[in-house]
Image (cartoon, rainbow, N blue to C red):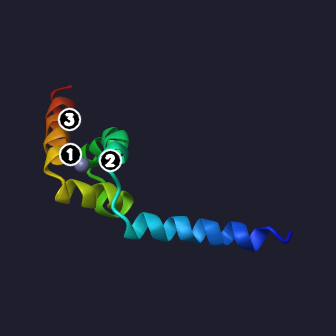
């Protein structure tokens, strides 16, 4: 079981990376459907998907994409 601490360290590192580093537009776009669904469901998306939430606040292109998606979903 000597590999476990290393696995844990890698896991911790990836978690911290996710929190610290900004996600790219690709990742944001991949998760946008889910983010929009949660938004429409009235969930706390800022807590549930903070990296997407932050990206949408910073990235105008993705925000416009997201708003278009949200409008489309509302029409369904
Ligand atoms: Zn973006």
Is the CB of the residue bearing disc 1 within 8 angstroms of ligand 1?
yes
Rendered image quadrant of residue 12: bottom right
Residue to which mark 2 is pinned: 28
Is the CB of the residue bearing disc 3 within 8 angstroms of ligand 1?
no
Is the CB of the residue bearing disc 2 within 8 angstroms of ligand 1?
yes
Residue at the far top in the pictured view: 76
Whether residue 48 is visible, yes or no, is: yes
Looking at the image, which residue is at 37% across and 40% down? 30
On the rendered structure, is 59 left or right of 51?
left
Looking at the image, which residue is at 84% across and 71% down? 2
Looking at the image, which residue is at 16% across and 45% down? 61
Question: How far is mark 1 from mark 2, CA to CA?
Answer: 8 Å
Question: How far is mark 2 from mark 3, CA to CA?
Answer: 13 Å
Q: Is residue 67 above or below residue 9?
A: above
Residue to which mark 1 is pinned: 62
Labels 3, 1: front one:
1
**Mark 2 or mark 3: whose residue is earlier in sequence:** 2
Q: Position of residue 74 (x, y in %)?
A: 17, 33
Placement of the C terminus among the 4 image quadrants: top left
Where residue 69 is drawn, which disc sits there?
3
Rendered image quadrant of residue 58: bottom left
Whether residue 44 is visible, yes or no, is: no
């Amino acid at each position: 079981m000597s590999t476990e601490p290393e696995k844990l360290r890698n896991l911790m590192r990836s978690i911290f990376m996710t929190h610290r580093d900004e996600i790219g537009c690709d990742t944001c776009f991949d998760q946008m459907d889910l983010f929009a669904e949660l938004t429409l469901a009235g969930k706390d998306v800022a807590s549930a998907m903070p990296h997407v939430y932050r990206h949408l606040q910073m990235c105008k292109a993705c925000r416009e994409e997201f708003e278009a998606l949200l409008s489309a979903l509302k029409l369904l």
